Amino acid sequence: MATRLLEQSRLLSQQAHYALQRGDLQEADRLLVQALRTCPNDVEARARYARVLWQCGKREEALQQLQMALSTAPQNPDLHVQMAEFLVELGRLNQAERHAQSAIAVAPKSSTAWLIQGRIALMRNRPDEALAAFYRALGVRPDDRDALHWIAQAYRAKGDWEQVLAVQQRILQGYSPGDEPPEQLAALGEAYRMLGRYADAAATYLQAAQRAGESNPYLALAAECYAQAGNEAEAQRLMAQIQPQQSPRAVAPQPLSQGEMTRMAGQEMLRR
């Protein structure tokens, strides 16, 4: 009987998963409540229900559900990781770290446990400690984009832009040509810019602009970098594409100084 009830609960939980993929939180909530009524000890359903509550903004209720799941399965590393992720978002780093360490103690080869441990270290401004954790995660799952992303963030915190550049290049190698996300291209452009490679940065920002729905922020950054590289003509040409959209009544855009282009680039990124 217990096995049959658990199977029914798992089926309802899976249907809730599909509802979540469709973005139907209300249906997912209904199905998971039904699943837990069917089998209150279904840890997977309770953890999924906690995520639904979290997405609905019911943070304390989500934590309570997850704590109930942990009471049933205290050695489940995935539950500890999920709890750590929630607590990180709430800024409760001490509690989050305890759960991250519990996950690592139970599953030392869990990449997600090492990632959350590294994120906590990074939030505490301990980039070297964070890097050690992120590389442990990468050792478990080589070329994992999440691990590489966080490694780049840690090197950025250290101000090691050569390493940021190398990691961003590695991330982009994992995409087919033409499928690179604009955010990843922009991160590469930032590394080039911080290293003083302005022409490379400008070209990379232009690639990001071609792939982005909102291209103005990247065009403004490309213009700034062209100006830094001494290519004023290309910088002015790009800024002329942006100016009419910002000032529809402007008749003939006047040439902008490098300082004005830098200011506009910052404003565009803030708007985005």
Image: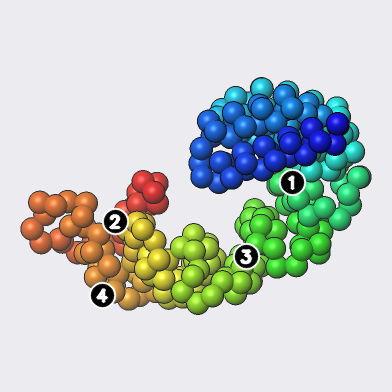
Q: Dot 2: few (<14), some (14–19), or many (≥20) neighbours within 10 Å?
A: few
Q: CA distance from mark 3 to mark 2?
A: 28 Å
Secondary structure, mark 2, is helix
Q: Give whichever of 217, 263 is nearer the camera.
A: 217
Please state the horizontal and vertical placement of residue 201, each as a whole percent of the image: 46, 70
| 108 sits left or right of 5 in the view | right
Question: Marks 1 and 4, how far apart in space?
Answer: 46 Å
Report the amino acid beneath label 3. Val
- The amino acid type, in three-letter code, at marker 1 is Ile
Q: x, y percentage for residue 266?
A: 38, 52
**Mark 2 and mark 4: span between their CA atoms?**
15 Å
Residue type at numbered disc 4: Ala
For label 2, the residue is 260
197 and 29: which is toward the camera: 29
Amino acid of disc 2:
Glu
Earlier in the chain: of badge 3 and badge 1, it is 1
Q: Quadrant of residue 146?
A: bottom right
Q: Which residue is mark 3?
A: 164
Residue 233, numbered label: 4
- Which residue: 62% across, 32% down? 31
Do labels 3 and 4 touch, CB within 8 Å? Answer: no
Question: Quick one: quadrant of the N terminus?
Answer: top right
Label 4 crowd bin: few (<14), some (14–19), many (20+), radius 10 Å = few
* Element at label 1: helix
Give the number of the mark in front: 1 or 4.
1
- Mark earlier in primary sequence (2, 4): 4
